[in-house]
Every structure is written in C-alpha cells, then in structure tokens.
Image (cartoon, rainbow, N blue to C red):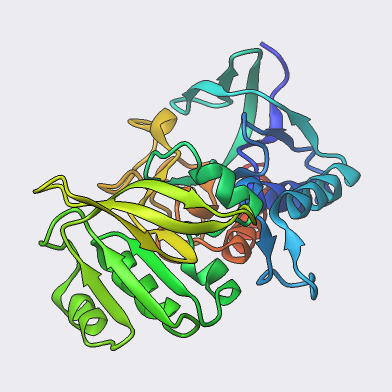
C-alpha cells in the first residue's frame, strides 16, 4: 500500500480549490483529484460579476484558473482523473481513479452539482459564450436589464428565479411542460401575482434560434398536448429544472438526502468520521461560487483540526 496522504480532495471548483489552498497553507500537502471538468460549472459560465475581488467581473474559466494557480502555489498536487471507487469503511480511506489508487487519512468531497438542462445541442455553447442562456438567475439576471426573458421550470426554484428576474427584465415568460406545478402554493401565488410574469403552459422548448450577433433571438415552443409549434421572441433563456449533485460514487458510502445531496453536520462533517463535504454536492440552498468557496475553507479547517485530534 502506498503512503496515506494527509488529505485528498475529490473535485475542484471554488470549494475544492479553496479547500486545497487552506490545507496546503496548513502544510498538509493536499492531493486534489480534479475530475474531467476542472473548475466545475464555472467553466461553462461566461462573465462572473458577483465574486469578491473582481471589481470589473471575470470570465468563469479565468477565475477557476486563478484559484487553481493559487492552490498550486502553496504546494497542492493536482491529478486529473475520474474517481471510480471509494472505500470509506476503514482507514486509511482508499480512492481509486481510472489511472491510480490513493490512500488518505482524511477526504474532502467537493464534486459539485450539475444543472439539469433541456438537452438541446446549442445550450452549453450559448452558456459558455454569454449568448443568453443561463441556469442561474441570481448569477446572471443583472446582465439582462429591460429585456424580455423566458424561464423554464415548474418548481419553487423556477418561481423564485422568475420573481428575481423581474428586478431587471421588462417581462418574464414562464414555461412548464404541464399545467400542474411542483412549486409550493405560496411561491406559485407570488409568481402569478407579479405583473411582469406571464405563464405559458403546457409548453416545452424544442429549439433555440440565434441571431447574427451569436445571441439568442427566439425559441421554438411546442404545446405537448397538440404538438403545435410557434416561434417566440426573447433575449434570454433561463433553465430552472433543478440540479443533480455529483454524488453517485458515494451512494451507500455517505448519508445523503432523497435528492442525493451529501448530508453534513457541525459544519462540513459527513456521516463518516474523517470525510468532509463542501460546495454544491452538499448545498442545495445557495449554490453560489462564494458560498462554495466558504464551505471549502470550512472543510479544510474541519479536516485540519480533526487530523490534529487523531494524533
């Protein structure tokens, strides 16, 4: 068996990189397994204007590159690879990737979550280029002042984000595939009473149409009951159909809620002593880069103090 690392961080993004920075500065010589999408969701985000320290905003990939370089500066070792198996049943913990096998005295899980998208070919391209598609109204709503926007979804998040968008938009049209909503009645009533929000149900988005400026100019809406389609002009499309935590590898190994989010207590402690979780894999409420970074700091400090207590 190879020598056990003090701490292995599974996943990158703001949570993972911040955990790496703090554990490296604590001289724990962290190993980070970065995964196949280094930087996480922010690598498919264009402008980020709500992260402290970037007064003029920053491109998502550039911010992740900065965080990575800062973590490496203090001695973080970074390996790229997908984790295929973990064994948290005994110490040291075992983490297996497609290329290597590692052992760890402590583990920080920061694998993030993935926004559920509509499945259209052009979606991710327009998200990455700033072409008018987003999965986060809180992050990107301010980029659409006085615009006509569309939001897709039927749960509390969709109602909340539609209401949030009315702070900036001229009009918000909410589309849902059914005329029955998963949203709580209070959230639904709040959205329906907002004069800037119009409901178009049942409706699904079949296509996104792009103008000469490489930005969204319209969508193709289909009524799933009649199959009738129409072109609907808009200047921004927000997808609010939920997130999926990237936690499947930990199923049966860590306690999770019904949606698959890793459950934490007393900060970032999981159900297995010595394993900590940070960022969107454990946080389904805030899902912001800055809160993920904050949790990464917490997990690093929790891991450092826990390791000290073991000695």
Residue 238 image point, x, y percent: 43, 61
Q: Is residue 302 above or below residue 272?
A: below
Q: Nearer the viewer, residue 189 or 266?
A: 189
At x 71%, y 14%, the residue is 2
Q: Is residue 39 above or below residue 139?
A: above
Residue 117 seen in render: yes
Image quadrant of residue 36? top right
Residue 38 image point, x, y percent: 67, 37
Q: Quadrant of the N terminus?
A: top right
With 101 as the anchor, is 3 left or right in this view?
right
Q: Nearer the viewer, residue 223 or 283?
A: 223
Residue 265 seen in render: no
At x 42%, y 32%, the residue is 250
Q: Nearer the viewer, residue 297 or 137?
A: 137
Q: Is residue 31 above or below residue 67?
A: above
At x 62%, y 48%, the residue is 128
Residue 9 image point, x, y percent: 64, 38
Q: Is residue 14 above or below residue 144?
A: above
With 161 as the anchor, is 61 left or right in this view?
right
With 60 as the anchor, is 257 left or right in this view?
left
At x 40%, y 64%, the residue is 233
Q: Quadrant of the C terminus?
A: top right
**How many numbered dots are placed on residues in this image?**
0
Image quadrant of residue 183? bottom left
Residue 18 image point, x, y percent: 71, 53
């Amino acid at each position: 068996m190879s020598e056990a690392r003090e701490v292995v961080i599974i996943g990158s993004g703001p949570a993972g990189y911040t955990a790496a920075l703090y554990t490296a500065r604590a001289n724990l010589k962290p190993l980070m397994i970065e995964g196949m999408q280094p930087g996480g969701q922010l690598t498919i985000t264009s402008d980020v204007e709500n992260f402290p320290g970037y007064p003029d905003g920053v491109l998502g990939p550039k911010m992740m590159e900065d965080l990575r370089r800062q973590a490496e500066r203090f001695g973080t070792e970074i390996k790229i690879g997908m984790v295929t198996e973990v064994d948290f049943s005994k110490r040291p913990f075992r983490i297996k990737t497609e290329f290597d096998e590692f052992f760890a005295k402590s583990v920080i899980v920061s694998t993030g979550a993935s926004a559920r998208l509509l499945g259209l070919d052009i979606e991710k391209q327009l998200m990455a280029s700033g072409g008018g598609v987003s999965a986060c109204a809180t992050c990107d709503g301010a980029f659409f002042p006085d615009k006509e926007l569309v939001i897709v979804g039927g749960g509390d998040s969709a109602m909340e984000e539609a209401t949030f968008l009315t702070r900036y938009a001229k009009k918000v049209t909410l589309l849902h595939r059914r005329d029955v909503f998963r949203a709580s009645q209070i959230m639904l009533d709040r959205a329906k009473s907002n004069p800037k929000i119009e409901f178009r149900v049942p409706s699904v988005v079949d296509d996104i149409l792009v103008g000469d400026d490489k930005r969204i100019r319209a969508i193709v809406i289909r009524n799933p009951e009649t199959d009738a389609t129409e072109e609907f002009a808009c200047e921004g499309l927000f997808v609010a159909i939920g997130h999926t935590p990237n936690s499947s590898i930990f199923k049966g190994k860590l306690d999770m809620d019904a949606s698959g989010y890793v459950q934490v207590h007393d900060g970032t402690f999981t159900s297995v002593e010595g394993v900590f979780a940070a960022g969107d894999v454990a946080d389904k409420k805030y899902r912001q880069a800055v809160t993920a970074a904050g949790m990464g700091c917490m997990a690093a400090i929790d891991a450092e103090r826990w390791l000290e207590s073991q000695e």
